Image (cartoon, rainbow, N blue to C red):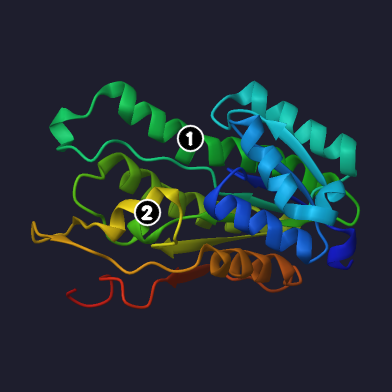
Amino acid sequence: MTTRNKVALVTGAGSGIGRSAALALLRDGFKVTLTGRRAEALEETQKQAGDLAGNTLAVPGDVGDPDNVRALFAATKDAFGRLDFLFNNAGMGAPPVPMEDLTFEQWTAVVNVNLTGAFLCTQEAIKIMKAQDPRGGRIVNNGSISAHAPRPYSAPYTATKHAITGLTKSTSLDGREHDIACGQIDIGNAATEMTERMKEGVPQADGSIAVEARMDVEDIGRAVAFMASLPLESNVQTMTVMATKMPFVGRG
């Protein structure tokens, strides 16, 4: 099956990495379901798709809500007949404050979107992928460099991204018998609204504040599209894509 006949679903598709990935998948010939909390943001992604907008389906919703997720995947199957690729991208962070000052509500909000949302979407994707003909599909989770090393004051985000690594490995293992591949992309400093503050300086592990290099978010879109393009007998288990000069490798 060529990508011209394949269907993808991208969460958090209304901005940043999700939008970039959705547009890259469309350019590669996928039909793409776009989801996110803001309908107007999804409409902007469709607008940026230009002539390819007709190959999209926009379904606003909250990935942390089981009813929303079931309706999202049902709408995708109704519209396109199958699902070949899921990019679990939706994510958020909590305010950068000392751990003891975080509220329960701030913690729960991050866990619901970053971890529970990815789990719920993975469940629904597996149900479709294992039953369709041709059988199988691919799931890619947005991990983050925080899945390897945290930033100061990032406990909820970092904890969920470490958990995403466990979800990725479990899905990769449990999906084998159904021809479902699963991998993870760990991203460092893509130039999006979420990383604007890096241009002014962000806290470092030694307590200092430093400006950090960023990279074009379109590079992430191309990386996700590459992972999606592989035949199911091949898998990128983990890919790290980062700004070359960001302080991650080594001691700064």
Residue type at the position of mark 2: Thr
Q: How far from the left and from the top, in percent, is residue 146?
A: 33, 56
Q: Is the N terminus in the top left, top right, bottom left or bottom right quadrant?
A: bottom right
Task: Give the labeled residue for mark 1.
Answer: 113
Q: Is mark 1 on a helix, strand or loop?
A: helix
In the image, what residue occupies the spot 28% across and 66% down? 212
Q: Which residue is rendered at x = 75% and y = 54% of the image?
A: 49
Q: Nearer the viewer, residue 109 or 51?
A: 51
Of tags 2 and 1, the one toward the viewer is 2
Amino acid at circle 1: Val
Q: In the image, is 223 to the left or to the right of 142?
A: right
The residue wearing badge 2 is 195
10 Å crowding of disc 1: few (<14), some (14-19), many (20+) = many
Say which of 224 and 22 sits in front.
Answer: 22
Q: Is residue 51 above or below residue 105?
A: below
Q: Residue 181: percent from the left, percent from the top?
A: 67, 61
Secondary structure under the numbered disc 2 in the rendered image: helix
- How packed is label 2: few (under 14 Cα within 10 Å), some, or many (20 or more)? some
Which residue is located at x 79 percent, y 54 percent?
Answer: 50
